[in-house]
Image: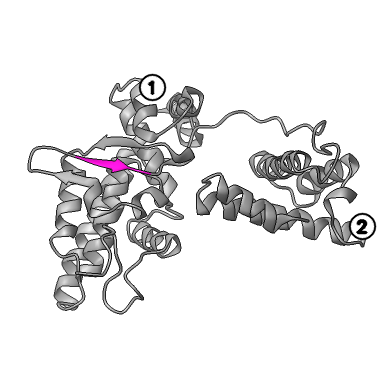
Amino acid sequence: MEIQNFRNYLISQDRSPLTVKGYEHDLNHFERWYEKSNNETCTLAAITPTDIRSYRQFMLNTERRKASTVNRRLAALSALMTWAVQQKLIETDPTRDVRSVPQVSAGPKYLDKKQQYALQRAIEKDLQLSKLRYPKRWRGRQRDGSLVLFLLHTGLRLQEVLDLHLTDVQVTDRKGWVLVRQGKGGKQRTIPLNAEARKALQEWLGVRPLVHHDFIWVAVENEGDGALSCRSVQRVIMRIGQDAGLDLLTPHMLRHTFGKNLIDSGVGLEKVAALLGHSSLNTTRIYITPNQNDLEMAVNSLID
């Protein structure tokens, strides 16, 4: 179904590895459904609008997927077909007239203040215990805790933070900043560092091992050539989240928490958008949209 060539196109457009992987996952899901449903190999030229509508109904009625999941997969198919038309692989886009599933916009998942304190405490406790139990190996836990707190207080995307070099940051006791050289869409932005972000970064740099490259966040002990992968960081964040009693903590949840904290502090949408690297204020407006937590609190307030 030309997924590999489409993947190469996405990479050439500077899409992040996580975005590319997400498109692949969704398109592979459609391909498996198509071949099972039609008992034939899935090719771009063979896909019809009826197939797309049937796939939509399959996800809604058989898999019982949420509207957000259905719409994301349909969007991946639409992107593939738009590219295929541009490449003259097909003449018309079979997704063109297929509607997305209507849904009420929901705010992003973020950590409230109590959860943020729990996360901070879990990191501090983990570091204290690791120094006692693993006096020769605790700096890996220092890196983990510092990285989580740095993400929480800068709002960087996961790939953005892993791409940072030592020359991309400047930190003093009173101020600091970080330069994101390759943000989403290839855009650069400079983010001031607050006291918590500076502290987390300095505590890690104080024990960071010497390696053959100058990435800030590197592996320790015997973990390969010193590079950190997205997957390894996701595991770290999930582990620390579980220690804090937070299930399914993700890098993007930390980013959303940063954005929500800014809004709650009275920072304007324009500044929040600049800090997060949003190209449109419509993207930033999700932080003034109530999420499920907010709605539950509103309903419960009626009986308090």
Q: Answer with mark 2 or mark 1, whichever residue precedes in sequence.
A: 2
Query: SS of the residue at dot 2?
Result: helix
At x 31%, y 70%, the residue is: 226
Residue 195 within the magenta-colored segment of the rendering: no
Q: Which residue is mark 2?
A: 38
Q: Could you tell me residue 156's position as x and y percent?
A: 36, 43
At x 15%, y 49%, the residue is: 199
The quarter of the picture where the N terminus appears is bottom right
User: Label 2 neighbourhood size at 10 Å, few (<14), some (14-19), many (20+)?
Assistant: few
Q: Which residue is mark 1?
A: 269
User: Label 1 neighbourhood size at 10 Å, few (<14), some (14-19), many (20+)?
Assistant: some
At x 25%, y 60%, the residue is: 214
Quarter of image, res 86: top right
Q: Specify whether residue 67 is in view.
A: yes
C-alpha gap between disc 2 and disc 1: 48 Å
Q: Hey, what amino acid is under mark 1?
A: Leu
Span shown in magenta: 177-181
Query: SS of the residue at dot 1?
Result: helix
Q: Hey, what amino acid is under mark 2?
A: Asn
